[in-house]
Image: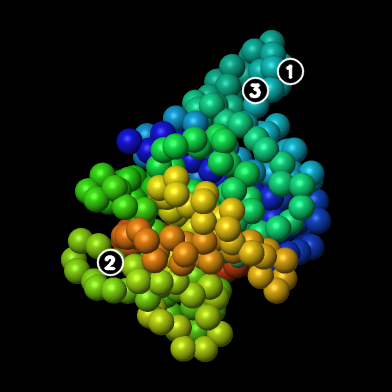
Amino acid sequence: MIKKAIIPAAGYGTRSLPITKVVPKELFPIGNKPAIHYVVEEAVLAGVEEILIIVSRTKNMISDYFDRSLELETFLKQNNKSHLLEKMKIPEIRIQYIRQTFARGLGDAILLGKSFVGNEAFAVLLPDEIILGHENTGLSQLVSQYEKHKNSVLGLAEVEQHKLSNYGVISPENKNDQFIKVASIVEKPKLNPPSNLAVMGRYIFNPAIFHFLEKTKPDATGEIQLTDAMNSMLLLEDFDGILIEGDRYDISKLEEYIAANQFVQFKEKC
Ligand code: G1P
């Protein structure tokens, strides 16, 4: 149903400095795999067949990671270490890359995927949010909701008041057991958040979002905000929200990054 996904990975990772001077946030290890490996796996498990990763000049290591390493494979085979080849496996999916030349924000990054997506609904996964520990991966839950109404879908979570200023926060039109109808979204509200329901970096968009992204003017910081485009689109099209089940970890917050590693380590021991 949802065959294409965009993973924006072009940001500077300023919240995780100084390590992000040299190591892209997307490659921070969780267990022995980089964070973005889990996000690509999540997309594959949800039925996605093609991924576009938006990168920047300093992110070439991401494409190196998802490529084969023939030299290392040959070394392992010739040195009686073939059992380790299993560990070299990368998710089986076609991945393309495009560079965002100017740091013009999340909306601009997604707009770079317009010709990749064409005229079909697609997913966006922000790779600083890792979802672990649920049999239905985060994106699969959004795909199930999309199948019901064919509306764009936002993955949400209930967040403590003092953390809401880190997220896009929705104003719900109504809320029932199955889904939440979204009225509008406020990006990183400093005062009076409209609810405790925050956008968790998982989206399914109908392709009309590109039209609204193209019309969105940069904000005061020069960035094109995805949230502004979503608010314009919400005036004309419905958006469904669902509460994502599973354990979420924002790896740009040190305590959550450590918790994600503890989770994976615990799972490996079991
Ligand atoms: C972005 C979005 C925000 C969303 C968040 C989820 O913000 O703009 O609406 O809630 O991701 O992680 P960022 O974290 O890139 O500043």
Q: Is residue 111 visible?
A: yes
To which quarter of the image does residue 140 belong?
top left
* Left or right for 185, reference 149: right
For marks 1 and 2, give the CA distance: 50 Å
Foreground: disc 3 or disc 1: 3
For marks 3 and 1, give the CA distance: 9 Å
Q: Please, which colouring scheme is shown?
A: rainbow
Considering the image in quadrants, where does the N terminus appear? top left
- The tag earlier along the polypeptide, 1 or 2, is 1
> Does residue 249 lie above or below 7 as drawn?
below
Residue 62: percent from left, percent from top: 68, 39
Residue 121: percent from left, percent from top: 40, 42
> Does residue 219 lie above or below 268 as drawn?
below
Query: Residue at horizontal 65%, vertical 35%?
Result: 97
The circle drawn on residue 68 is 3
Q: Amino acid at mark 3?
A: Arg
Mark 3 in CB contact with mark 1 (< 8 angstroms): no
**Which residue is the site of mark 2?**
180
The circle drawn on residue 71 is 1
219 or 145: nearer the viewer: 219
Q: How would you rate the neighbour count of disc 2 (Cα within 10 Å): few for under 14, some for 14-19, many for 20 or more?
A: many
Q: Indicate the secondary structure of the residue bearing disc 3.
A: loop
> Does residue 5 lie above or below 155 as drawn?
above
102 or 244: nearer the viewer: 102
Ligand 1 visible in quadrant: bottom right
